[in-house]
Image (cartoon, rainbow, N blue to C red):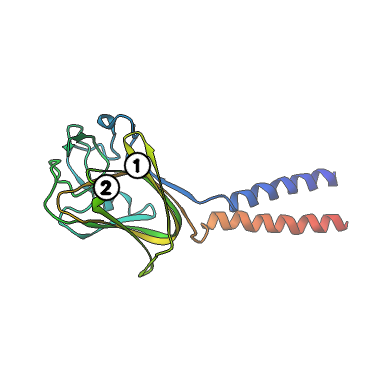
């Protein structure tokens, strides 16, 4: 009987500790993206065919998009007929694009702000002029120079992977005739664990203590 109890406690310990140390992976997908067919991008907001403020959609999910410069700011558009720079698609996060799907004449600066320090950030990216964008990362108010950036081609988009420590990434247009779209934002954070995770961790520690006491019996 005692052995069965020990096995049960051990199993609970493994489950509790595994859950408490699981990777804090987050995902915001702006739709069921089919990267090989930009005409079939689907949007996260299906309420209409006009732009909406992205901040209103995601500020409660650990990430906020904030316009630093430019009147249009970050918007999303689910208009499938949107044609910008000869590329047709719908419902990515758009920077530098009018709701009517035309390129604006402003230099836009947009921050992607996280609620916690991020160690990895991945997203799909499309632009009409890759040379006209500046990427910067910050931790607090300090610009982070030590950052690894890798790129992979995924269909008609580029997948970026930023790794380091930062809580904000800034996109800056270097000319007023450019635009970019972002989708499938994923990140790993080093935030304080959620209360339910801490509870599992505590249960795991209690189980370890119980096992040690049982061994002494």
Q: Which residue is mark 2?
A: 130
| In front of the other: 137 or 10 | 137
Question: Label 1 crowding class (10 Å Cα cut-off): few <14, some 14-19, many 20+?
Answer: some
| In front of the other: 158 or 37 | 158
The image quadrant that residue 197 belongs to is: bottom right
Q: Earlier in the sequence, mark 2 or mark 1?
A: 2
Q: Quadrant of the C terminus?
A: bottom right
Q: Position of residue 168 (x, y in %)?
A: 36, 60
Q: Is residue 23 above or below residue 146?
A: above
Could you tell me which residue is drawn at 12 percent across and 41 percent down?
Answer: 100
Q: Position of residue 76 (x, y in %)?
A: 24, 44
Label 2 with label 1: CB-CB less than 8 Å:
yes
Label 2 vs label 1, nearer the camera: 2
| In front of the other: 145 or 68 | 145
Could you tell me which residue is drawn at 30 percent across and 40 percent down?
Answer: 44
Q: Position of residue 57 (x, y in %)?
A: 29, 49
Question: Label 2 crowding class (10 Å Cα cut-off): few <14, some 14-19, many 20+?
Answer: few
Q: Is residue 56 above or below residue 87?
A: below
Local SS, label 2: helix
Residue extending furthest front? Answer: 131
Q: Quadrant of the N terminus?
A: top right
Could you tell me which residue is drawn at 64 percent across and 52 percent down?
Answer: 17
Would residue 35 appear left or right of 176 to someone viewing this image? right
Q: Which residue is mark 1?
A: 158
Q: CA distance from mark 2 to mark 1?
A: 10 Å
């Amino acid at each position: 009987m005692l052995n069965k109890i020990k096995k049960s406690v051990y199993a609970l310990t493994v489950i509790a500790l595994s859950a408490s140390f699981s990777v804090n992976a987050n995902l915001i997908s702006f739709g069921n993206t089919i990267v090989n067919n930009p005409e079939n991008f689907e949007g996260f907001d299906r309420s209409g065919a006009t732009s909406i403020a992205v901040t209103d959609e995601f500020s409660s999910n650990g990430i906020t998009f904030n316009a630093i410069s430019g009147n249009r700011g970050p918007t999303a558009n689910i208009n499938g007929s949107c044609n910008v720079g000869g590329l047709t698609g719908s419902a990515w996060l758009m920077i530098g694009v009018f709701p009517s799907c035309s390129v604006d004449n402003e230099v836009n600066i947009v921050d992607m702000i996280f609620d916690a320090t991020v160690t990895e950030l991945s997203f799909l990216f499309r632009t009409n002029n890759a040379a006209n964008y500046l990427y910067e990362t910050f931790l607090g108010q300090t610009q982070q120079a030590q950052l690894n950036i890798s790129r992979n081609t995924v269909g008609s988009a580029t997948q970026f992977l930023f790794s380091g420590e930062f809580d904000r990434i800034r996109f800056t247009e270097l000319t007023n005739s450019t635009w970019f779209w972002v989708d499938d934002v994923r990140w790993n954070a080093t935030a304080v664990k959620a209360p339910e995770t801490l509870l599992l961790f505590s249960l795991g520690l209690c189980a370890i203590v119980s096992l040690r006491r049982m061994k002494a019996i």
